[in-house]
Image: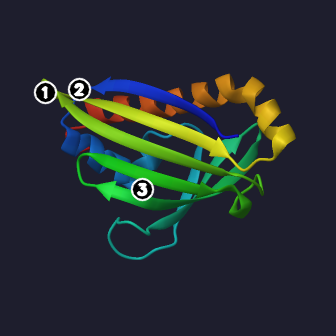
């Protein structure tokens, strides 16, 4: 059974600026906590099918995951799939769905996360660790929002 949670954040920027920041892989080093690097695996513009390997420092070690864009509606939504079998964890999958809604000169960003395919025991254990994972995601969203709100070109 998949683990799911939702994070919402109001960002003082237009949906266009928020969307641009979500897809700007080169800017991730300016806001992403524990950032090590991103390796672009798909040439060309950011689109459905774009893949990259993202590496962060976690628990004192570098951890990499393979991301793929599976849905994209400019300035409205972005869907990402992370194949855990191709990353440091060597199992499971993650889905992230970002929805952007204009709200009086601001944007409400809603991110839905789903973690699955970990196996019964790890998913059971995951229920206890879900709070920590959600805190990390909230930290990412807060950091990105701070970057967007503090940058005139984000």
Mark 1 neighbour density, 10 Å: few (under 14) some (14–19) many (20 or more): few
Q: CA distance from mark 2 to mark 3?
A: 21 Å
Q: Quadrant of residue 37?
A: bottom right
Screen quadrant of the N terminus: top right
Residue 123 horizontal/vertical position (percent): 77, 38
Residue 45 horizontal/vertical position (percent): 32, 70
Q: Residue at x 52, y 28 (%)?
A: 139
Judging from the image, what secondary structure is the residue with disc 1 in?
Answer: loop
CB atoms of marks 2 and 3 within 8 Å = no
**Residue furthest bottom in the image:** 43
Q: Which residue is mark 3?
A: 25
Mark 3 neighbour density, 10 Å: few (under 14) some (14–19) many (20 or more): some
Q: Is residue 16 left or right of residue 52?
A: left
Q: Which residue is mark 2?
A: 12
Q: Which residue is mark 1?
A: 105
Q: Quadrant of residue 59?
A: top right
Q: Residue at x 23, y 47 (%)?
A: 75
Question: Does label 1 or label 2 sit earlier along the sequence?
Answer: 2
CB atoms of marks 1 and 2 within 8 Å = yes
Q: CA distance from mark 1 to mark 2?
A: 7 Å
Mark 2 neighbour density, 10 Å: few (under 14) some (14–19) many (20 or more): some
Residue 104 horizontal/vertical position (percent): 13, 23
Question: Does label 3 or label 1 sit earlier along the sequence?
Answer: 3
Q: Is residue 136 left or right of residue 84?
A: left
In the rendered view, tell whether residue 57 sits above or below residue 128: below
- Mark number displayed over residue 41: none
Judging from the image, what secondary structure is the residue with disc 2 in?
Answer: loop
């Amino acid at each position: 059974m998949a683990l799911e949670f939702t994070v919402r954040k109001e960002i003082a920027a237009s949906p266009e600026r928020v969307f641009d920041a979500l897809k700007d892989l080169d800017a991730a080093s300016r806001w992403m906590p524990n950032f090590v690097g991103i390796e672009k695996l798909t040439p060309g513009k950011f689109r459905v099918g774009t893949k990259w390997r993202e590496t962060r420092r976690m628990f004192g070690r570098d951890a990499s995951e393979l991301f793929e864009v599976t849905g994209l509606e400019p300035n409205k939504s972005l869907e990402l799939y992370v194949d855990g079998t191709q990353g440091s964890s060597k199992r499971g999958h993650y889905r992230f769905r970002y929805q952007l809604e204009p709200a009086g000169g601001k944007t409400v960003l809603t991110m839905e996360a789903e973690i699955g395919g970990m196996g019964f025991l790890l998913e059971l254990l995951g229920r206890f660790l879900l709070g920590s994972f959600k805190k990390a995601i909230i930290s990412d969203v807060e950091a990105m929002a701070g970057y967007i709100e503090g940058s005139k070109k984000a």
